[in-house]
Amino acid sequence: MKKIVSLVLLIVLVIGLGQSAAASDNNSESINEKFGVPIVVYGETLTAEQKKAVQEQLGVDEKADVEEFTATGEDLVKYIEGENRNARMFSSAKITRQEKGQGLNVEIVTPENITEVTESMYANALLTAGVENANVEVASPEKVSGHSALTGIYKAYDVSGEKLDSVRMEVANEELNVATELAKDAGIDKEKVSELLTEIKKEIAEQDPATKEEVEKIVEEKLQSMNIELSPEDRQLLIDLFDKIRSLDIDFDNVQQQLQDLTKDIQSTIKDIVNDESFGQKVSDFFTGLLDAIAEFFKSIKNLFS
């Protein structure tokens, strides 16, 4: 009898292990044979130790099925005219291409280290460059502006056989520079800058302006409707940028939905920031009230003995 019970338990155990293994196999991420495995591009300046940290941040281990490359100063000047080949490049990226309709999703996995560029800024610039339907993850082990990540992303598409238009890549880089410059010099919230760029881009897609004057009108209308004040110089930066974007060979019908999705993401982020600030103010008010109460308490004690 004991032998039979033992045998039954053994059979149950084997079946259980088999089902567990099968479930594990089914749950593992399959490779998209159309686009291949994800591509990871590391910044050239990374030390061996920093590269290891970035691999952990991007979820790349020894078992990970990815292609790995390094973005160099030579790549920087290759993809973006006028850049410095001796630039220090820490920003790294992991790119997983998706089927049409999946949209462009950007995640900064080390937000504490990417100090100037936001996820929506990357997304806006990448759509301008021609990057669509992909999951993009950006990381850096050091505090950096984040601009060089674009070079790594461009290289990922290049090595995969899909060459992006060189003019669009340069304009995308200019767009990222304008976005970060407005956030720094004009004192506008980063997400508000991203929202402005997205709204102008959506309006250009809808109106299809034929002249620079029409672009200027769109820019002025959006600045007014969003209550954003800019210096004449900063306004001109926007007008010149979007006049270039207008002249690019961009199928705006193709990216319209991704722009709509980007708008929702930006608005959600802004809402989260506002809620956080409201919560922070409540906490501040609580402690201010608490300190006032303590001061009053000690003042009343002092009055008792005076």
Image: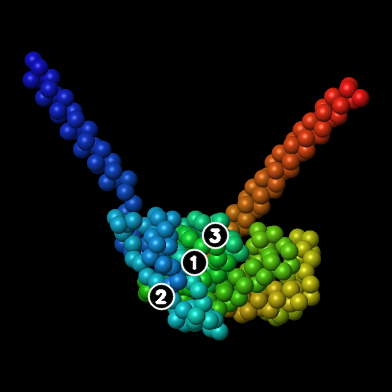
Quarter of the image with the N terminus is top left
Q: Which residue does the numbered mark 1 point to in the structure image?
A: 91
Q: Residue at x 9, y 20 (%)?
A: 4
Disc nearest the viewer among 2 and 1: 1
Disc nearest the viewer among 3 and 2: 3
Q: CA distance from mark 3 to mark 1?
A: 9 Å
Q: Residue at x 64, y 47 (%)?
A: 272
Name the secondary structure under disc 3: loop
On the rendered structure, is 70 left or right of 138? left
Image coordinates of residue 244 in percent, x first then y, are 63, 79
Q: Residue at x 62, y 72 (%)?
A: 177
Image coordinates of residue 61 in percent, x first then y, are 34, 56
Q: Mark 1: few, some, or many residues within 10 Å (few <14, many ≥20)? A: many
Quarter of the image with the C terminus is top right
Q: Amino acid at mark 3?
A: Asn
Going from the N terminus, do you reach mark 3 or mark 1 first? 1
Q: Are marks 3 and 2 in contact (CB under 8 Å)?
A: no
Image coordinates of residue 134 in percent, x first then y, are 46, 62
Going from the N terminus, do you reach mark 2 or mark 1 first? 1
Q: Which residue does the numbered mark 3 point to in the structure image?
A: 113
Question: Looking at the image, can residue 89 be seen?
Answer: yes
Q: Amino acid at mark 2?
A: Asp
Q: Which residue does the numbered mark 2 point to in the structure image?
A: 158
Question: Looking at the image, can residue 251 be seen?
Answer: no
Q: Residue furthest bottom?
A: 82
Quarter holding residue 171: bottom right
